[in-house]
Amino acid sequence: MNNIYYVIVAGLIAMLYAFWKTNWINKQDQGTKKMEDIGKHIADGAMAFLKAEYKILSIFVLAVAILLFVGNISRGTELVSVSFVVGALASGIAGFLGMRVATKANNRTTHAARTGLASALNVAFTGGSVMGLSVVGLGVIGLGSLFAVYSNQFGTDQENMLKVLNILSGFSLGASSIALFARVGGGIYTKAADVGADLVGKVEAGIPEDHPLNPATIADNVGDNVGDVAGMGADLFESYVGSIIGSMVLGASIAVGGGFDLSFVTLPLFIAASGIIVSIIGTFMVSVKEGGSPQKALNIGEFGSSFIMIIVMYFLITLLLPSSFTLGGTEFTAIGVFWATVIGLAAGLGIGMITEHYTGTDKSPTNSIVRQSLTGSATNLIAGLGVGMQSTAIPTIIIAASIMGAYYFAGLYGIAMAALGMLANTGIQLAVDAYGPISDNAGGIAEMAELPKEVRERTDKLDAVGNTTAAIGKGFAIGSAALTALALFAAFRTTVETLRGETMNITITDANVMAGLFIGAMLPFVFSSIAMNAVGRAAMAMIEEVRRQFKNIPELSAALAVMKKYGDGEKMSSEDRKIFDEADGKAEYGKCVEISTKSALKEMVVPGLLAILTPVAIGFIFGAETLGGLLAGVTVSGVLMAIFQSNAGGAWDNAKKMIEEGVEVDGEKYGKGSDPHKAAIVGDTVGDPFKDTSGPSLNILIKLMSVVSLVIAPMIAKINF
């Protein structure tokens, strides 16, 4: 047990690394006074939203903690409420640290892009690495510390270890709860601003993206941080924690020579701790010379660390685990556990590559959407929906094959370890993910600060790479969600069977199980509907506000009229330039930020409660078997819906970007302002809530419902409807 302190030390190293890199970013030049002011507007808006969100969530956390304490006190597991609070706090702190450094790195990346691409990549990626290492550091410190405390208090024999792990599962519940609210709230915020900025700014007013005359442009850039930094960070934090706890619970049920071996419980913690060191090594692999490829630099860091992680996992597994063990009456080997983790890692990479194929620029699926944009918005939308639906096939086959392969090598423990293998180097994965929105913000600041064209070209190059890395990141998020949910489901079943002392039969011929299956399959559709409608309502308010400002603020109206007189790159007359300059600072950015903030905070509550209360209601009323059917239904349906929505939205987005860069179809060229461009903007606007609100939130929905079920398993084990 003393070795567990190495895990906590690894977490502390991650936090020291994050603080070191934060200090480095703070020392970088922010650029001109205008760039500094724009960066401050974005930072203030992002932190104001986060503080308002956390204020609401603190009430929720307190209420749930009290319920968990009261519900578990009779069984002696009331400390699950403490675990829940610690998990929620860790998730919240990770989001806060990531958001703070991202909003400091954005204008510094813009300034670095004035001198070259290499320095800009360095600043943006360093900002992302703070988010990545904060997430894994806080996760490992929280889990490792609580596990050490509870093990010392209750003991480490098999019976007490099951009690310890049930209490520890509250940590995952806290992380998952915050993650869902962060994802949904952040997604509503960013897409309300994005839709308003695009439809009124680009289509109606005809002004470029991120133009300072657009009142919604600050809210749009704030949304990138709220949704893609804090939201994605919370998402992967709870996946990371969930996969560790799921494999620990299953490890407690493994027999070695007829006895209990604690190594199977502690192995996931040691793999996670090792992943931190490997991720830090990976960050030092990311570097690019001037004129080099940012994509290649990021790939070296991500794939290089994955290769090192495979070697590390091999030695950890073979050194810590006995050569053979029994699970569910079947004998497996330590080397089988290793192959299960490799399968998980390979599955994540495979899903990421397929995601990139369906959403990447100049790929055949995206090209098909571009071509069908020539005939209007309707055919653009039809093409995007078709691409999204088609994109579910290969990832589903990969997930199914990885489940079968991992189970073959190490049973249910193998499936849990496959999920952990996929997330072992979350630190570097999330660093690459968070780099994207920082680069996107940097481009927006370059546009608003009216910097030279070559600066925007450099930030756009970084942003384009960020879109590809985001696609791979979403592949990992979706794949890990499926495997983590299955691991947690297996842990739920194991807990119920242990308490009952008999096998839990979840068969589709049972009417209760089938009923639960259908209700579970329905939930992702209802959840997506609530999220999409929330974005629609918030976007309507944003559009009305932007239109009002364009109409009622004379300086904005005059500047828009001047802009329509000139083509892209044309020089204004001195008189027109004076009119244009008089509009500087007249847009009321704060009102748009306020609309997004209020809408997101109001609309995130219902989807969050739906995810938490549904398994509680089904479990306590109809029992564990019906709840098992519910979890199976929501997992299968939710994974497919998440893949469909994320990929359809990504394909629509990149089709629009391809037209903006200029495309040639059947000998004719199309670009910004053309009819196909307007059709592509409509498609992108529909896809925005798909890929950034409801799609990513479904990953959390399926895991959160499994975690809730695991936490309440001891209370409902004896209920049989």
Image: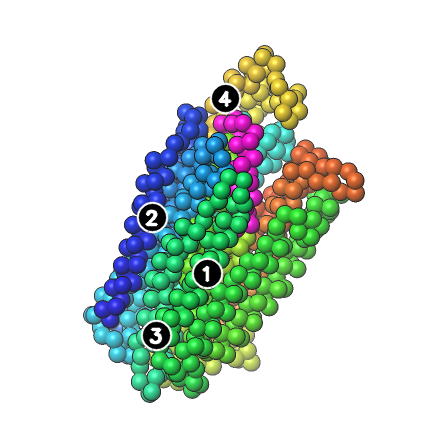
Assess disc 3: are there few (<14), some (14-19) or many (≥20) residues with their C-alpha within 10 Å of its C-alpha: few
| x and y percentages locating residue 25 in the rendered image | 36, 39
- Asked if labels 4 and 3 touch by Cβ distance under 8 angstroms, the answer is no
Amino acid at the residue labelled 1 = Ser
Which segment did they paint magenta? 447-470
Q: Mark 4 points at which residue?
A: 584
Asked if the residue at tag 1 contacts the one at tag 4, i.e. Cβ–Cβ closer than 8 Å, the answer is no
**Disc 2 marks which amino acid?**
Ala
The answer for how far apart the CA atoms under marks 4 and 2 are is 37 Å
How is the model colour-coded? rainbow
What x and y, as percent, mark residue 420?
42, 66
Q: Nearer the viewer, mark 3 or mark 4?
A: 3
In the rendered structure, the answer to whether residue 232 lies left or right of residue 69 reads right
Q: Do the residues labelled 4 and 2 touch (CB within 8 Å)?
A: no
Residue 462 located within the stretch drawn in magenta: yes
Which residue position holds label 1?
306
Name the main secondary structure of what is drawn in magenta. helix
Q: Which labelled disc corresponds to residue 319?
A: 3
Which residue sits furthest top? 575
- The disc placed on residue 285 is none
- Which badge, 4 or 2, is on the more N-terminal residue? 2
Residue that numbered label 2 is attached to:
18
Which circle's residue, 3 or 4, is located before the other in the chain? Answer: 3
Quadrant of res 677: top right
| Element on which disc 3 rests | helix
Q: How many labels does the image show?
A: 4
Q: What residue type is labelled 3?
A: Leu
Q: What kind of element bears circle 2? A: helix
